[in-house]
């Protein structure tokens, strides 16, 4: 019995889940070659960005430990998909600012820490690469946190330190809107990248050993970060602009700069970031991803679990009905291939955006992850490169950022 099969059979609380899982996973594995299956089971598989935190906050009946037929992530499906480590996003929309944004961020950090505390058989809070490796040995899923949107520090560097102290390991500098110190890729630039305070935030993140996340930021903000940072940076959930021309995606030049910096781009599975055809058609139908989400959020009365899940339901229905081009999960591979060609296999990873985006067909939830490993094997990727893409590259960046903070401390 392999490590993950053992974990699967011991960690689930109800026999009903076990038998359901065996049925689903054996059905799934018929289509998967044994070589890629064992590779997936032995690799440390990481997802750098899921929005499941919103379900914890807005749906009091939501139990992460139970298998659900909606949404993309829960413990049984993470086990089934062989996921070893996952970054839960701490996200408040960019329209919400000031002390309210800060308060809501702290509530979400508490919700993540509490869900870990109440599921210790399956989950463990991790803040370092060593924690993630230990969790894998203990057959528990490592839960990490990333703050998605620098507006949540309320323009107060002390709050950045508070986030770090509570276990937050990365901060995405902006969300869809500019904040008071950084320009976003989906807003009209006002700061020409980072302000003087924005640059202080970068230096403090380096000092704290918190990873800088360049997903969502404007191209000039990205350039400013690359010039200033003393540690590798990540794009926790971004795809390739050469394939899908959305400003949220990264250009080839940005990918090359990220590689030179030692960082990683984690491919986002959102249909409009994967497929140019879908992006154009869905923008015509619903407006850009930022305005469409804001509109859905208003319809949902500010319930962000509702807004993301309803957006996905709407898009998937439209794809099924032929009103939007159908996007298949193979598109994810196209983006991985492209990023590997441009940035190299040492600089690519996975950042699904599960529970925060419209998933392509065949990647309905986290249980489908082994399909990616299988496809990479079939494409002729080496085992070493596949392990790096599945999680090794992110672990390397975490270690580098941890070392950089030690170096900074020593030089003081
Ligand atoms: Zn995002």
Image (cartoon, rainbow, N blue to C red):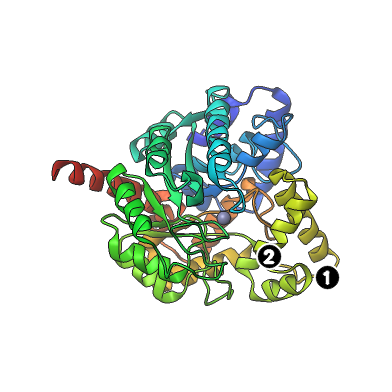
Residue closer to the observer: 13 or 153: 153
Residue under label 2: 328
Ligand 1 is found in the corner quadrant, namely bottom right
Quarter holding the C terminus is top left
Furthest residue to the right?
Answer: 321
Residue at 31% x, 60% y: name it. Answer: 262
Residue at 48% x, 67% y: name it. Answer: 218
The quadrant where residue 56 appears: top right
Residue 89 image position (x, y, % from top left): 54, 45
For residue 63, say whether it is visible.
yes
> Which is more foreground, mark 1 or mark 2?
1
Residue closer to the observer: 171 or 67: 171
Residue at 54% x, 56% y: name it. Answer: 175
Residue 11 image position (x, y, % from top left): 58, 25
**Left or right of 324 on screen, residue 379:** left
Residue under label 1: 323
- Answer whether labels 1 and 2 touch (C-beta < 8 Å): no
> Quick one: label 1, few (<14), some, or many (20+) residues within 10 Å?
some
For residue 2, say whether it is visible.
no
Question: Is residue 295 depicted above or below 246 in this figure?
Answer: above
**Left or right of 161 on screen, residue 311:** right
Q: For the residue labelled by badge 2, is the local secondary structure a helix, a strand or a loop?
A: loop
Residue 406 image position (x, y, % from top left): 21, 42
Question: Is residue 202 depicted above or below 291 in this figure?
Answer: above
Question: Is residue 324 depicted above or below 154 in this figure?
Answer: below
Residue 275 image position (x, y, % from top left): 64, 71
């Amino acid at each position: 019995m392999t490590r993950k099969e053992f974990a699967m059979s011991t960690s689930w609380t109800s026999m009903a889940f076990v038998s359901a899982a065996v049925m689903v996973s054996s059905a799934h594995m018929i289509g998967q070659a044994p070589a890629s299956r064992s590779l997936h089971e032995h690799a440390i598989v990481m997802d750098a960005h899921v929005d499941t935190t919103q379900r914890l906050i807005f749906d009091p009946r939501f139990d992460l430990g139970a298998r659900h037929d909606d949404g993309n992530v829960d413990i049984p499906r993470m086990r089934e998909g062989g996921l070893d480590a996952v970054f839960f996003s701490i996200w408040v929309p960019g329209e919400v600012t000031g002390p309210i944004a800060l308060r809501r961020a702290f509530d979400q950090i508490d919700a993540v820490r509490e869900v870990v505390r109440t599921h210790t058989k399956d989950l463990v809070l991790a803040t370092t690469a060593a924690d993630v490796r230990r969790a894998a040995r203990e057959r528990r899923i490592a839960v990490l946190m990333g703050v998605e949107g620098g507006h949540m520090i309320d323009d107060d560097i002390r709050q950045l330190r508070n986030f770090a102290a509570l276990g937050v390991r990365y901060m995405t500098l902006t969300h869809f809107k500019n904040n008071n110190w950084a320009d976003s890729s989906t807003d009209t630039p006002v700061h020409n990248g980072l302000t003087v305070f924005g640059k202080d935030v970068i230096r403090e993140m380096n000092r704290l050993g918190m990873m800088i996340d360049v997903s969502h930021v404007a191209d000039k903000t990205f350039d400013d970060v690359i010039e200033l940072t003393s540690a590798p940076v990540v794009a926790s959930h971004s795809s390739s602009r050469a394939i899908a021309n959305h400003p949220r995606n990264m250009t080839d030049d940005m990918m090359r700069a990220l590689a030179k910096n030692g960082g990683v781009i984690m491919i986002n599975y959102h249909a409009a970031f994967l497929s140019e055809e879908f992006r154009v058609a869905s923008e015509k139908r619903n407006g850009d991803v930022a305005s469409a989400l804001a509109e859905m959020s208003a319809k949902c009365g500010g319930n962000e679990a509702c807004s993301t899940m309803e957006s996905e339901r709407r898009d998937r229905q439209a794809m099924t009905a032929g009103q939007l081009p159908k996007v298949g999960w193979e598109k994810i591979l196209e983006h991985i291939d492209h990023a590997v060609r441009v940035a190299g296999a040492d600089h690519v990873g996975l950042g699904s955006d599960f529970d925060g985006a419209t998933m392509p067909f065949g990647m309905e939830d986290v249980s489908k992850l082994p399909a990616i490993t299988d496809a990479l094997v079939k494409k002729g990727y080496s085992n070493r490169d596949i392990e790096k893409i599945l999680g090794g590259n992110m672990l390397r960046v975490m270690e580098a950022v941890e070392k950089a903070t030690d170096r900074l401390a020593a030089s003081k």
